[in-house]
Image: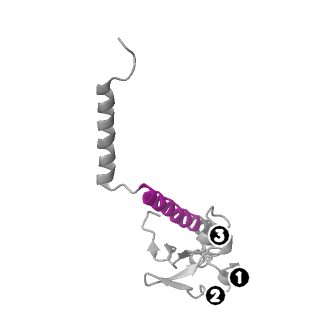
Amino acid sequence: MKKGISLVALIITIIVLIILTAAVVITGVNTPQNAQLAVFLNNISTVQEAINIKMLNNMAKYATTEGDLEKYKWVGVIQGYTEANAENNDALPESVLQIAGKDVLAIDNSLKNELSISETEVLKYYVTTLGKVYYQGFEYEGNI
């Protein structure tokens, strides 16, 4: 008996490969686009998580009364909102942009430094006064 691949095994292997290729083409799998979407969704959820953590840390650090919970949570989250703003009961800065009909505010530089996203990419993320993250026209719908 000779050692090696038989012609039947070779033909079966080729047929299986053709079937798998056809299945991928028919289902319309767009691997590069899916990978880009996965990276984008990961980035936006990372920004949302960083904002939530910063707000919770602020509330734990500064809040002594229920009224403080709302005003101090924005320190270091929204650009231009500092401890002095919170102490003086200053309003949040005016909106810098409207996305999907919502007023959104730029994210503070100190928060940007905590993220592992490129500086130019982070500049595209905004937050509403409800703490929801927007990305130039895309609203994050994930669980927060």
Question: SS class of the residue under badge 3?
Answer: helix
Percent position (x, y) of residue 123?
60, 74
Seen from the viewer's position, the closer of residues 16 and 108 is 16
The answer for how far apart the CA atoms under marks 1 and 3 are is 26 Å
Percent position (x, y) of residue 22?
30, 48
Say whether disc 1 or disc 3 marks the residue closer to the N-terminus: 1
Figure check: 98 above or below 17: below
Is residue 46 on the magenta stretch?
yes
Residue occupying image coordinates x 28% and y 26%:
8
Percent position (x, y) of residue 44?
52, 66
The magenta-colored residue range is 31-51
Pointer 3: what residue? 119
Residue occupying image coordinates x 33% and y 56%:
28
The residue under label 3 is which amino acid type?
A: Glu
Q: Is residue 132 left or right of residue 51?
A: left
Say whether disc 1 or disc 2 marks the residue closer to the N-terminus: 1
The residue under label 1 is which amino acid type?
A: Ala
Pointer 2: what residue? 90
Question: SS class of the residue under badge 1?
Answer: helix
Figure check: 5 above or below 123: above
Instruction: Look at the numbered discs 1 and 2 and tell me whether their residues touch, using CB distance below 8 Å.
Output: yes
Residue occupying image coordinates x 56% and y 66%:
47
Q: Callout 2: 10 Å neighbours few (<14), some, many (20+)?
A: few
In the picture, the disc for residue 84 is 1
Say whether disc 3 or disc 2 marks the residue closer to the N-terminus: 2
Q: Is residue 129 left or right of residue 2?
A: right
Q: Callout 1: 10 Å neighbours few (<14), some, many (20+)?
A: few
Figure check: 8 above or below 61: above
